[in-house]
Image (cartoon, coloured by chain):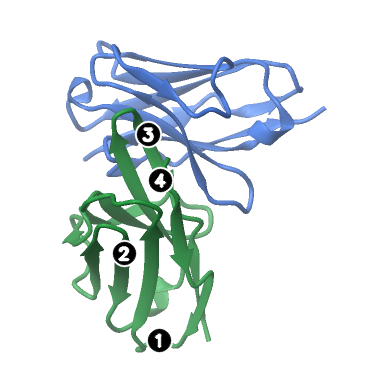
Chain colours: A green, B blue
Amino acid sequence: EVVLTQSPATLSLSPGERATLSCRASQSVSSYLAWYQQKPGQAPRLLIYDASNRATGIPARFSGSGSGTDFTLTISSLEPEDFAVYYCQQRSNWPPSITFGQGTRLEIK
Amino acid sequence: QVQLVESGGGLVKPGGSLRLSCAASGFTFSDYYMSWIRQAPGKGLEWVSYISSSGSTIYYADSVKGRFTISRDNAKNSLYLQMNSLRAEDTAVYYCARGSPDYWGQGTLVTVSS
């Protein structure tokens, strides 16, 4: 089973700053890595799929990179609405399963 | 637009049962595999179960295997989760999710407590 480890657990930044979130897999997941944003009381929202593709309607300030075991979500210039919890996720085709990282809380400094 | 609407959550005693439903609209339901994913209060996301587009392939997380049953009715555009022998640690918001997943429902809260 693939384990995803996110760092840091909490990131404190100010609006306008650049955010860099990391996700490391215990074994290669190729490019099957997604990122989600979750705000309090809401369902997760897909931001990035297949490591670097922005989902429909996601602003260009969000970008993803990486392959194999090391992945990064970058928010180029933080907007007030970006402060939330971010999860990375990978899917296994066989046997079918989904694994999530433990999350990174992005908070206002 | 894609919509997933869960229902059926509530308060149940340990050992009890509950059946969750997820009504899908805005896409061809029978084209997609579906999952149930849960989130305990203040915790992260945990995948619970997977069902293929036809319903012929099903998998469960070890934490629910033997207690939960996933099913779907493509004629009714609906996904289900039958939960038996519920435990306090099953308390969570349960989400249905499409595919990889790309769309999630708003979730339904299941509370297991005496």
Instruction: Write down the residue under mark 2.
Output: A70
Q: Measuring 18% from the left and 72% from the top, which residue is drawn there?
A: A60
Q: Pick whichever of labels 4 and 1 is earlier in the sequence.
A: 4
- Cα–Cα gap, marks 1 and 3: 36 Å
Check the image and report above or below for A100 versus A59: above
Disc 4 designates what residue?
A2
A99 to A86, vertically: above or below: above
Q: Is residue A85 visible?
A: no
Q: Quadrant of residue B58?
A: top left
Give A54 or B108, whichever is nearer the viewer. Answer: A54
Q: Amino acid at mark 1?
A: Pro
Label 4 and label 3 in one chain: yes
Q: If you read the primary sequence from the N terminus, does the residue marked by circle 2 or circle 4 appear first?
A: 4
User: Do the residues at pointers 4 and 1 share their chain?
Assistant: yes
Secondary structure, mark 1, is loop
| Residue type beneath disc 2 | Asp
**Labelled pair 4, 1 in contact (Cβ < 8 Å):** no
Where is A45 relative to A91, above or below?
A: below
Name the residue at the right extreme.
B114
